[in-house]
Every structure is written in C-alpha cells, then in structure tokens.
Image: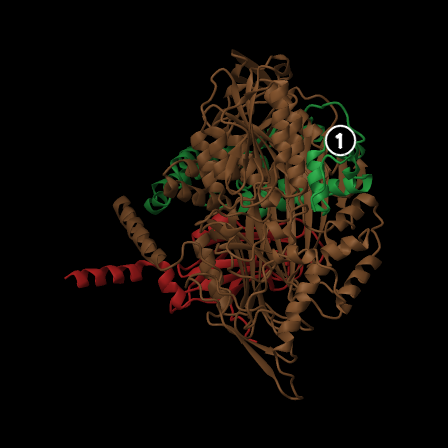
Amino acid sequence: MRRLAYLILAATITALVFASCSMSKRREVSTGPADGDLAKADTPSAPPNAGQPPPAPLRALDDVAGQPAEADSRGASRVDSLKSQPFADAGPAAARRQMNHPAQAAAPSDRYLERVVGPRHRLQQAQQNALASSIPALRPGEELWVIARADLREPDAATPPPEPPPRSGLMAKRPDSDEAIPLPLKHTDVKASVAGYIASVAVTQQYENPYADKIEALYVFPLPQDAAVSEFVMTVGERHIRGIIRAREEAEQIYVQARQQGYVASLLTQERPNIFTQAVANIEPGKRIDIQLTYFNPLAVHDGEYELVFPMVVGPRFNPPGSSDGVGAVPRGQYGSSGQPTEVHYLTPGERSGHDIALTVDVDAGLPIEAIASPTHVIDTSAPSPTQRHVTLHASDTLPNKDFVLRYRLAGEDVRGAFLTHRDARGGFFTLMLQPPADLSAAPRAPMELVFVVDCSGSQMGAPLAIAKRTAERALRRLGPNDTFQIVQFSTTASQLGPRPLPATPVNLEQGVSYLRSLNSEGGTMMLEGIKAALDFPHDPQRLRVVSFMTDGFIGNEAEILGEIQKRVGDARIFSFGIGSSTNRYLLDRMAMLGRGAVAYVGLDEGSQRAVDQFYERVSHPALTDLQIDWGGLAVRDVYPQHLPDLFVGRPIVVTGRFSGDAPTTLHVRGRAAGAERDIAVAVDPRGDAPRPALPNVWARMKIADLEDRATATDENEALDGEVKQVALEYGLMSAYTAFLAVDSSQRTAGDHGTTVAVPVPVPDGVRYDTTVAPGPQAER
Amino acid sequence: MTADRRDPQAHLDLLELDALRAGEPLPAAATAHAAWCADCASELDALHDLASALRGAEATPIAAAHLDARVHALAATHAARVRRSRWRAGSTAAAAAAVAVFAMAVLWRDPLRRAAAPPAEVASASAPRAELAMRDAALADDLDGDGRITVLDAFALARAGAADPPRIDAVVAMAVSLQANP
Amino acid sequence: MTRRVLACIVALGALLAPGATRADVSRFRPVDVWLDSGGQPLAAYQVEITAGPDAAIVGVEGGAGAFAEPPHYDPAALRGGRIILAAFTTTAGAPQRRTRVATLHMRESGDAQPSYRAVVMVAAAPDGRRIPASVELVPRQGDPR
C-alpha cells in the first residue's frame, strides 16, 4: 500500500510539473480582452489614452511649476474652491495633516495653491482639450465608438483595457466640478481588539461599482507582516459567504473560472508578507460587495510601551533593473507600465479617491493603563474602566495615507514573563514574552564601529531625509572617544565618507556632520550597494560593528536584500531606523532579526530625540546573547524563532512553540552578557488553560516566517516552500503559497466578466509623487 | 532657486519650520537651508519634541509587563470545574481516549494519509500526543458528558452566558475538527 | 519512436494533470443544506457532509433566519472531501419547520454530477435538549440573469 501511495504521489508530481509548464509562475489576473476593447461614448469625451500618445511624464511638472499662471477659468475656479475649503475643526495638527494632500487643503497662501495645484491641473486640462479637439462633433442620434489598441508588450504581460466610463462623466475629473474620482473601493472599516499582547483585527473593505458596466476590482494593500490572516467573508447583499483557503494556484484557477462564467467571486493573495492583493470579480453596476478579513498579530513592546500598528498604504517600491518579481509603482490607470507582476496604482497629488477609513481599537490590558496616544493620527479615547480603553480614529484624520500607530503604557511591575497557553485537538500551543533583566543596563559596553547607511533615494526627498540626517547627527555626537564611525549613502549607487572608519574625535565628528548635511536625495534605491558598502570592508575585531540603516525600505527585492544580509552580516549587529509614514516594516524587522539587533520607527511627526536615546540604550548596553531556555518539566517542540535573538534592555522577545504537560512556574534563561555566563530564573505567570484560539495561528505564522527566512538563505527553496504551504493549509492561513477564495455560485451575472479597475491609492504622507511613481520602467528613475 | 546658505536672512520662520515638521512642500531653497543650518535644525528638533511631548503628556516611568488578574480568576474557576468534571467523567474519558487512540492508530496506518502527511517535525508531535491533547480537551469542555466535544457543548456555554466568546469559538472549533472526529 | 514516447508522456500528463482536465468542464453550483426538526424548535446542529472527488468547496454560506451567519467548519477539512458544519443560535425565533441552515458553494468537474451525502451528528432545542432531525442536501443551478 505504501508503494502504491508513493507511486500515486510521484505521478501526481509529474502531472503537476507538466501542467505548471503551461501556466505562468505568478499568474496575472486577466485584465480583459487581449486585443483592445470597445468603449462607447455618447459625448465627445473618450478615455484619455484612447488612440493618443501617453501623457507626458510627471517629471515635466517641475518644468511647468515655475511658469506664470495662465488665464484659465477652470484653473482659477480650482484655486478658488480650494481656498474656500475650511480648516477642520479638530485643531491645527489635524488641519495640517489635511494640508499634506493638496486636494483637501485649505492652503495658507495663493502662491502655495498655484505652485502645487495649478500646474498639474493645467497639464491635465491641456491633455483633455487636445483630445477633445481631435474628435469630430456629433449630430443628434450619432454615436461615437472608440477602439483602444492594447500595448504591444510581452504576450504574458498584463494587457488591461481602458477603464470603463463612469455613469456620469469623465474618468479622472469631472470638467465642471471637483468631485472625487469614482472608484470601486468606497470605505474600509477596521475593528481591533487587544487582549494581553495579542491583537485580533477585523478589516472590512466595501467595494461598490460606480460605473455603468460590470467591473472587477483589484486592490493592493498592506497588513502587518506578522499578521495571521485566518478568516475571509464575502458579503453579497444580505448574504455572508465564508471563503476557504486553498493552494494558491488552485485558488487562482477556480477564481478565473468563476469570473469567466459570470459569478461574483473574490480572491485574496499574498505578494509579500506585508502586501496583499484583493480581487473581486463581476461587481454589477451600483452593487456593493464587502470583504472582511480577520487576523491576529502580537503587539510589539518597546521600553514598556505596547505598540499596535495598522498600515494603510503600500509605499512606492523601487525595483532594481532586470527584476521581474517586484512590486511596481505606476500612475493611476497605467496598467503594466512597470513590468512587474504586482502593481500599486497611485493618485497624483491633485486627485483624491473618496476612499476613507474608520478605525476603532478596544484595549483590555488587565492592568491600569497609564497613558495611551497615537503619534500619527488624531484619536478620540474613552475609558470604560481603568484597565480598558476605547480608541476611535477622529473623523478629520481618515485619509488612508500613513500607518496608524497606537502606543500605551501599563502600571505595575513585571518580574515574570507572560506565558499564554492554548490546547485543542492538535495539542498545546504557547507564547512566552521574555523580559530582559534590568541589571543588564549597569554593565559597560564595548567600543563600537558605527556605520550609518543613509537612504538617499527619491522616496526620501524632503522631510524623511531631513529626519534621517538629524537622527544620524544626534547619534554621532553621542559616540565615545574609543568608537569609530563610517557614513555610507546609497541611491542608484553608493558612496561613503572615507575609505575607512574614522575615530570619533571632535574634528572627525564635525567632518561627519558636514558630510551628512551635504546629502541630497535622488535616483533609485539600490539598497544592495549600501549593504555591500556597509558590511564588506574589513572589520575591526576590537570593536563591535553596529550598522544602522536609515531608510523607508521602499524596495521590491526584499528576498534578495535579506539573503545578502544573511551572507554578509557576520558578527555585526543591525540597528535600523525606519523613517517615514508608511515604512516597509517587514523588511526592516527582518533585517533587525537577521542582524540580531533592533529597529526603531520614526514618523514624520515625531522627534528623533527619543528614537536616538533608545538606540543608544540598545547599543550601549550588552545584550544577553546566545540565549537558551531551560523549560523545566515542560516538554516543548517547534519553538520559534528557532535561533533566539539577543535580549536587549527594554526589548522583550516573544517566543512561541508547542508543548505538552503542565505549564511551569519558573524558567531558566541562560546566556552571555559582558563576557560572563548568566543564568537567570524567570518566574512565569501561567495564565491558565483558558482557550486562546489566536495562539495556534500566531505559532503557525511564526513558523511560516521562519521557513521563509530559511528559504532565502539556502537552496532548499522547493522543500521549504512546500512546507510553508503545508502549514498554511493545515492552519487555514494566508501565505505566499495559499490564497483565500469565495464564490457565490447562486447567481450568475449577465455579460462578460467586465473590466478590471485597479484601486488607486495616495502616495504615503511625506513621499513625493514625482520622485517615486514613474510613468515608465522603474529602472530609469 | 538656491539661497546663500550662510545668509542669516535665509533662516526659516516659525511657520516654515512647522510646515517642514508636518511634511508639507516647501521651496527647495528652504528645504536645503534646513538641512544645512544647525540653528534651524535645532529649532525643528524643538518643534518635534514639543509636539511629541504634548501627545505623551501623561508619560510615566518605565513600567514592566502586566498581570492579567481577570484571566487569573477565570483560570481558577475553570480549573475548579475541570477537577470536578475529571472526577465525574473519569471512566467516560478513559473510553473516549481509547477510541481516540484506536482512531489515530488507524489513521496513522492509512497509506494515503501517510503519503500526504505533514512534515515530520509536526507529524511526529501530533500523532502520539494528539490523543493526550484530545483527552485533556474532552475532560475540560465536554460539558454534557457524552464523551466527545460537539456544538452542544459550545451551545451550553453560550446559553450559560459565563464564557468568553474566544472560549466558545474554541469549543466549536474542536467540535468541527476532523482530527477530533475521525 | 521518440515521437511515440513524447506522445505517451503528453497523454499521461494530460490524463493526470488535474487542473488541465477539470478546467474544461468545471461548473459552479450551490448545494443547500436543509434540516427538518419535525416541528420542534431547532437551535443548534452539527452535520457531517461528504462530497465526491469531483467536487470542491469554494464557499460556505449561512442559511435562513436564525442561521444566517456562516456555520463553523474546519478549514483543514476542505481538502479531503469531508466537512463538518456546526452552528447554534441563542436568539429567539428558532425555526421549527424544514429550514435551510447553510449553503455550500461547489465547483464541480467531470461529466457526471458528484455525489453528496450528509449525516446529522447532533441537533438541539433552545434549552439544550437533544432532538431528532433529518438532513437533506439539495443541489441547485445558479440563477441565470
């Protein structure tokens, strides 16, 4: 019987290999007919790109900006309407946040409005006027049919048809008003519930078809990189259909079939651990489809503060030349222009989509909450009890263009690690939050060789680079006389302060500060060059090399970067700063893990003082290294992370695993600190066997992350990928090899499968559109 | 567009500094000056710190991790109930465990399931320990004492109104689990 | 000889490749799950359903009235052609007649309609008392517009 089983398995594998040869590795969701489309227009208006050369690249706007304003009635009305918009009632901070998006701004001066809004609007108007003038006037009863020819690209590249005309006007902007662009994603609702240090979050996306034709909506969006997505429900009218998790290729195949046959269907796929694509097919005109996702993720704890992060927008990624598996950043509607399988469509600064977000967080901490605040958004807070808080995103701050961060502190002392358990038919699961012993902070530190690696790419232009330079300067000035330092800058290439690290003398420090202040941002994000420059030069064995990246992480080749770091890091430690409103936390957290260090995130509205002070707390005091945990009588297995990170003051670590037996009351943590062996007894607070259905998902998610890390470092990709899929299917989780799918087979919609419309998003707060979203191949940026 | 960076008149005023703090677009010269000028950079830091300080006005000394008193109370109640149900359902549990062991043995020998078995590190743990876990679960959540976990146990918890939704969900999950219902 | 060998490999691959075969004749169909509690109010149920190898579940929908929310099920079960559905309601209005408690959305392949079977594991009244119930699976066509 076993031989027969193996024979069947081998035959199945052969067949799957055969079948996979005829399918693309990363299937592109079909975006419409291959040879163009017919767009019927009753008016002289037509899709802007129908039969016309593509609009001028947005870089040209910089040339236009300096020109005097033309007499343009529409432009003047645009400026006037913006000037008439009132400031929000929530206060100056919220009002300033609104001003980050000019379309919503009540700007402080005419010069500001004219500089930001006028040129872009004039260019769009000029393009539309040119198009309109080439179309003959129609007589009553006549119809104008516009046939759009598809771009001649690779046969397997996406060939999207023009977007369908909305029911009541032009696609991008109505000529006689400033009404928002009709797009299929109307609203996102987020409800988070925190118990202990695990958050359960339900995200509901409301899709609605504002067009006269059937559409398929495509939305690329972020989630926390350690989110264990375990539930998926599609709501059609009053009916709720729970989706199922399947192997990705199978789910994609079923979705395509359902779409082609006219059924309402939805498919959720993972492009990166923190980037997902939601596809909803056959949304009929005027109809609404809701998609609800539920995930668990553990909160980060830094220096006694719990931190909940909900990302809202994917930042525009740079993909190195020749990459074919990246994440493209394209202007709205320019399908396939990046050549990448996943594309995020961005609104120009003068456009807004009308998509807003509502967010609530319920915290049940078990201990009195001393302080709760958001450094990124305006929030309203109520306190049902001293140990609970209800937090709501203020109505004035609902533009989804930056990560939502919530931090809170609790009262009381912690002398024990929090040990949470859960048992079910699969066995026992635990998570352990291990607190570092306080006396580590008293030990002296070794001399450092500090290497700053500053991201000077286009996405850092403006406030992000200013913050990075200020942060690095502050850190430099705290170096001791026995330390050395080096400064590396990277964009399209990399360069550095000098051929070798400099001693931290006053003269050299001033030289370093001058170099920092001279840095400007431009070009792409060849992070690999920065990594090589930071890690490849000879290491001083008498010093601890600390590499500090200062970046937003907006790259599309994370796997390559993480693989190179694993190869080169050696004994160095990586302590990074994620700078910006929507940083790539997946990349930066993994870099810190691989580099046995830590990462601090500095938002645009935060000062860098705190981040630098915390940075020095990390690097200035030795960690407890080479950790091993003695579990006592508890039988544990499948513990993740497999290689325990170093334990820093103020930075507890979360360990998860499987167990059997009774939970212990004391654990022993052994390691080395300041050259000496340490054995620390940790009193464990067993929380009893109350069911915690989140724990199996958290464990499975961490196992998947560990497998993915191993896959980037070894050649065992296929075996590890198979294991990822196995774990994900067993626990019903999203992964790169599984997908959620839901099909409403009870009703078939009429007509073909409609037109694909990608949901465009705003560029993240603080990021410039003209230096990050290219109209052509990203390698040329 | 480039101002003389050493010109003291090129310092940013308070509004411009605050605009820079908020990430709003500014003339290139102003942005470049802020990057160079130590005075302006210092003032910008102060603005950032002030904003942060206002938000964190209730900042307290560093606190350590928390104790979950409510979970303690629930755990104590649950443990007491487990002790009573163990004493009452000992023989039923033993029979259920025997059935579970027999079922797991059959599944373990099933060649097709072995061919599609999960990786060794999970399989080696799940099979011999699952029966112990299932017996533990049966003892704890088999409220109607029929020797297995079904939706009726979750229904009983929900009707009693005493259990948290996560516990109810966990019991239902166990009820529909194929592993628990071979 | 080489051509014959290649033809055999191609044929074998075509025969064994599951996606290539089923994609040609796949269709979607909802299968309603009806429970009849014989006049007694039904507040909780647990049903085991098995489907033939040519059927794959692509969605689990709730039923009518008090059972409108999708029922609970084991995600891992969906790979093996066997699934257990369970749901309960504590609200008033427990149905007493034959009631649709859930709908499984299926993708079917092959020429013949796959077989579906269901067994009631448990059913209960609002007071938790076990009651007898019968289950019926009713495949239907998707409504054309």
* Residue B86 place in picture, x, y as percent: 57, 30
Q: Residue furthest left?
A: C1
Q: Residue furthest top?
A: A676
Nearest the eye: A18 or B74: A18
Q: Amino acid at mark 1?
A: Asp
* Residue C27 place in picture, x, y as percent: 45, 67
Output the chain of dot 1. B
* Residue A486 place in picture, x, y as percent: 55, 26
Nearest the eye: B63 or A666: B63
- Badge 1: residue crowd in 10 Å (few <14, some 14–19, many ≥20): few
Q: Which chain is red?
A: C
Horizontal side of residue A2 vs A709, given as left or right = left
Nearest the eye: C30 or A87: A87
Q: Colour of chain A?
A: brown
* Vertical position of residue A261 compared to residue A106: above or below: below
Please state the total of marks drawn on the protein image: 1
Horizontal side of residue A527 vs C24, given as left or right = right
Instruction: Tell me what residue is drawn at x 46 percent, y 65 percent.
Output: A257
Q: Quadrant of residue C10?
A: bottom left
Instruction: Tell me what residue is drawn at x 66 percent, y 65 percent.
Output: A124
- Judging from the image, what secondary structure is the residue with disc 1 in? helix
* Vertical position of residue A258 compared to residue A101: above or below: below
Q: Which residue is mark 1?
A: B39
* Residue A684 place in picture, x, y as percent: 61, 22
Can residue B40 be seen by looking at this rendering? yes
- Colour scheme used in the picture? by chain
Q: Which chain is green?
A: B
Can residue B68 be seen by looking at this rendering? no
